[in-house]
Amino acid sequence: MAGGDATQLRPAIEQLREGMAAAGKPPPGIVFATQLPLDDPPRAADQVAQLAAVGVTRLVHGWRYADAAAFARGAEVMHRFLSA
């Protein structure tokens, strides 16, 4: 989240889950789109952990990359801290 507080999402996520349960539906997946700070892997990992803690089940990381090599570097950073 660009400067946001992930805990602000918790009430809306809980309300959505409660509504789905009341309707007899399975829990929804919660997809959050952001741009992670890949130049600061510990901060990015913390951001991912905070989002997971409030109920985000899938994360979309959108970023621009100059070429295939830049994409590969970004993918390596994400793999390193997300698979730990």
Image (cartoon, rainbow, N blue to C red):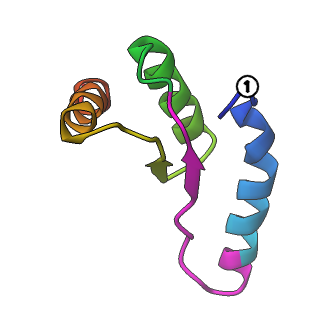
> Which portion, as a residue range, is magenta?
20-36
Whole-percent x and y of residue 35?
54, 37
Whole-percent x and y of residue 13?
71, 56
Asked whether 80 falls inside the magenta stretch, the response is no
User: If the image is split into quadrants, where does the C terminus sit?
Assistant: top left
Residue at image position (23%, 33%) is 79
21 vs 76, left or right, is: right
- The one nearer the camera, 74 or 69, is 69
Residue at image position (37%, 38%) is 65
Residue at image position (50%, 15%) is 43
Few, some or many residues within 10 Å of mark 1 (<14, 14–19, 20+) = few
Quick check: 31 above or below 72? below
Quick check: 59 above or below 79? below
The residue pinned by badge 1 equals: 3
User: If the image is split into quadrants, where does the N terminus sit?
Assistant: top right
Q: Quadrant of residue 3?
A: top right
84 vs 3, left or right, is: left
